[in-house]
Image (spheres, rainbow, N blue to C red):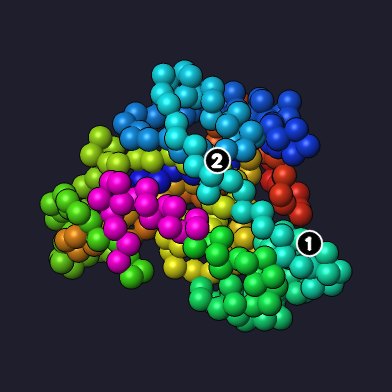
Amino acid sequence: MRIIFIRHGDPDYEHDTVTKKGLREVEALTERVSKWENVKAFYTSPLGRAQDTIAPSLKKMGREQETLNWLQEFYYPAKDPETGKDHIMWDMKPEYFTKNDDYFNKDLWMKTDFIKSADGEKYYKMVCDGIDSILSRYGYHRNGMMYSVEKPVPNPNWNNPVPKWHLTPVKKLEDENTLVFTCHLGVMFVIISHLLNISPMVLWQGFYVAPTSITILNTEERSEGSAYFRIERLGDTSHLKEAGEKISSSGYFSDVLQEV
């Protein structure tokens, strides 16, 4: 199983679409995505900036998408601990979240007062149930912190020692269930936190992916009938470099390294 996440293009939040720069990013993205073969399905956030990002690729490929409401940005406001005003639960200052170890615990982060003020556990479960329902369509069923595989493909790595620390590379693109999700930074990290069994706060606060970036997860199926997800690429923007387009820093509080 392969999952590909696409973050929407440089956002025009006021009009819920992409900026002029975002349109250039989408053009470069479309050249890349339209070359992908054997994608089983495309899933998209209902928000305009995500829809506008993937639409040109779908048109060029002659493909359709399924819009999923739970893929919308994870914007469920909590009470800001300093001002008492509503605030995005995952946009916190380090001076606050680093004082409480519970934020870094996969089970306790949602029990903190700040997250509880947004009913965060409810919305987190909604997204987790959403992605698990999609995976179940393709025979991957959540089983504890792993996934049971309904129809495992014979694999020489099953139950064998790993020679020289490397698995035998047996997967082929045409044999894979590849699913593409076009969505947003916040909700993407929620899904990844569920797949990897870590607190989303670790991802929200410690990682950044730029607009139109590509993030890929694969299952490593080292035992018959069992699968665990692993990140292959995070925030890949090589299509922007090839197009001579600078990387957007939208959602980042620092300067992005530019290599164009």
Give percent across and percent down for residue 219.
32, 54
The residue at which mark 2 appears reads as 45
Q: Which residues are magenta?
A: 126-143
Q: Could you tell me what secondary structure mostly forms the magenta stretch?
A: helix
Does the magenta run of residues contain 134? yes
Give percent across and percent down for residue 123.
56, 60
Q: Amino acid at mark 2?
A: Ser
The residue at which mark 1 appears reads as 86
**114 w.r.t. 184: above or below:** below
Q: Quadrant of residue 243?
A: top right
Give percent across and percent down for residue 99.
71, 81
Q: Is residue 137 left or right of residue 111?
A: left
**72 w.r.t. 241: above or below:** below
Can see residue 218? no
Give percent across and percent down for residue 84.
83, 69
Q: Quadrant of residue 140?
A: bottom left
Front in this rendered view, residue 124 or 256: 124
- Label 2 sits on a secondary structure element that is loop
Front in this rendered view, residue 175 or 122: 122
